[in-house]
Image: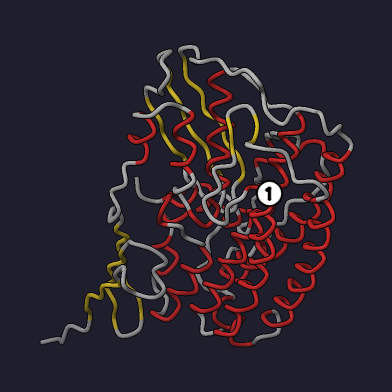
Amino acid sequence: MQDKTEMSLFMGPQHPSMHGLWALRLTIDGETVLNSDCQIGYLHRSYEKLLANRTYEQGIPITDRLCYVESHTYSQAYAYSIEGIYGIEAPEKANWIRIITLEIQRIASHCLWLGAMSVDLGQLSMLVYPMTAREILINLLETITGARMTYNYARIGGVYKDLPHQIEKKIEDSLVEFKRLHEEFLDLLEEAQIFRMRTKGIGVLTKEDALSFGVTGPMLRASGVPYDIRKIQPYMGYDQLKFSVPTRTEGDSFARYRVRLEEMEISMAIILQALDKYMELKPSDPYRLEKIPRRPPAGNTYRRIEGGRGETGYYFESDGSTSPYRVRIRAPTFNNLQPLPQLIKDGKLADIPAVMGSVDLCVGDLDR
């Protein structure tokens, strides 16, 4: 009689590498992962139904809560999508402000991801460096919006208020300081043998599988697909800016880490270009449309932007009333999580935190 060596292991929400309220049921043989089952649905927040039961404007602070790590991205995408159903366009100044704040939020999101992933891999000191750098960016967003985490800064047809007086000096100084810290990230991790051993060749996602699962963002670009909505379907003025799309071909955890590090540098360049465009405008130029139609026409629309984790979009169906008839949220985490069982299969139990960390989960936008 052969002894059975397989066993089930539950990595539940309480596990330090879970990064949110979801569960991973594993079938393992010793330290080898034979199979896994990702289980979501612990939150039951019903955000799409909440949005459909409020006016379009009232939904803005709700979308801030979809993903607290980059809340401004979700509320800004929401306002941009509503403008599509209303058939209006925000003023030029509003778009440059949006780009500046969106890219600051992108870098801040990547900083939190880097700190969390480093801790998952035992690099405890690396929690301090990215979080210190993140504070620089959060302070910038606080100066601009008045809040530190859930900003409520987006508005239909523009933004809540103009940039503060002489903010350009603070932005430039902050980016100089952040660039110095960014170089420290590379010094601490690029030559760290343990970090490389635990990420290189771990959790490989092929180009074909990435496209099949509908993966977007840094995960897709790390598998060799230069897909960035800012390039393929420019919005808000990104087509007037010069920037590249970082890609890797390895598709492993290290490639996903490297793509995000490069994106931080590119976002800094975008912020400075958008700031130059903003400074060319007059102080009296509008940052928000003065008149917004009370009711949108009946119809439907889907608009999307490139968030820190990938494609972030909203589908609206309007019946002509002050509230949407139906709302559907396209959150990148939902698709990006789908390949996880395949990425950890036949790997070691200790590799799971490295793979999960490189995916960059935000469970708030995962559960509906």
Comparing 27 with 162, the one in front is: 162
Q: Residue at x 31, y 55 (%)?
A: 40
Look at label 1 and name its amino acid.
Answer: Ile
Residue 92 sits above or below residue 150 on the image: above
Residue pushed farthest left? 1
Q: Residue at x 68, y 40 (%)?
A: 98
Q: Residue at x 57, y 49 (%)?
A: 310
Left or right: residue 296 compared with residue 159 = left
Left or right: residue 145 compared with residue 267 = left
Which image quadrant is residue 36 in? Answer: bottom left
Q: Residue at x 45, y 34 (%)?
A: 59
Residue 177 sits above or below residue 172 on the image: below
The residue that label 1 is drawn on is 144
Left or right: residue 229 compared with residue 68 = right
Measured as percent of width and height from the top left, residue 357 is found at 50, 69
Measured as percent of width and height from the top left, residue 223 is found at 60, 58
Comparing 115 with 128, the one in front is: 128
What element does badge 1 sit on?
Answer: helix
Measured as percent of width and height from the top left, residue 302 is found at 52, 28
Residue 93 sits above or below residue 45 on the image: above
Residue pushed farthest right? 280
Quarter of the figure with the C terminus: top left
